[in-house]
Image (cartoon, grey):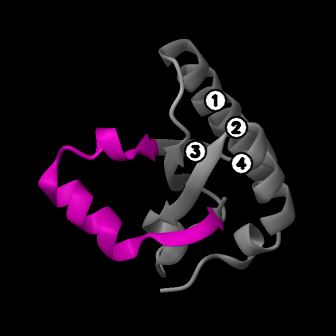
Amino acid sequence: MAIQAFILEQREALAELCRRAHARRLDVFGSAVRDDFSEASSDLDFLVELEAAQPADYAEHYFVLKEGLEQLFHRPVDLLTQAALKNPYLRSQVEAERKTVYVA
């Protein structure tokens, strides 16, 4: 499994966006790291670890990152946090597929 080239080409912009959004780590998973990615119809799936913050600030950081990713890649983005991975099947799938694109 390899990360789609168009994501890797944006590493500098991704790093800047992650710094602005106070992200500690950003991983990509799903079709963007598998062979079933469709340039025409696939969204992008990311898992983020944000710095600890007050709830209002945390929400702002989350949406800065989500909207920034959608603008950067011109496609819908599903942005998950570790807390959202309660389903054991989804958690194991994400853990098996995830590829790191940013670490603070």
Q: Nearer the viewer, mark 4 or mark 3?
A: 4
Mark 2 vs 1: CB contact within 8 A: yes
Question: Between 37 and 70, which is closer to the camera in this rendering?
Answer: 70
The residue type indicated by label 2 comes to Ala
The residue at the point 63 percent across, 63 percent down is 103
Image position, residue 59 (x, y; %):
55, 22
Which label's residue is closer to the chain start, 4 or 1? Answer: 4
Which residue is depicted at the point 14% across and 55% down? Answer: 88
First in sequence: mark 2 vs mark 1: 2
Q: Specify the quadrant of the image occupied by residue 76.
A: top right
Query: Residue 28, image x and y in percent?
Result: 53, 63
Q: Residue 72, image x and y in percent? A: 80, 49
Residue 43 part of the magenta segment? no
Residue 69 lies left or right of residue 82; in this view the side is right
Q: Disc 4 or 3, which lies upstream in sequence?
A: 4
* Mark 4 touches mark 2? (CB < 8 Å): yes
- Identify residue type, mark 1: His
Marks 3 & 1, CB-CB < 8 Å contact: no
Q: Which residue is mark 2?
A: 21
Identity of the residue furthest to the top in this view: 56
Q: Mark number for residue 61?
A: 1
**Marks 2 and 3, the one that precedes in the sequence:** 2
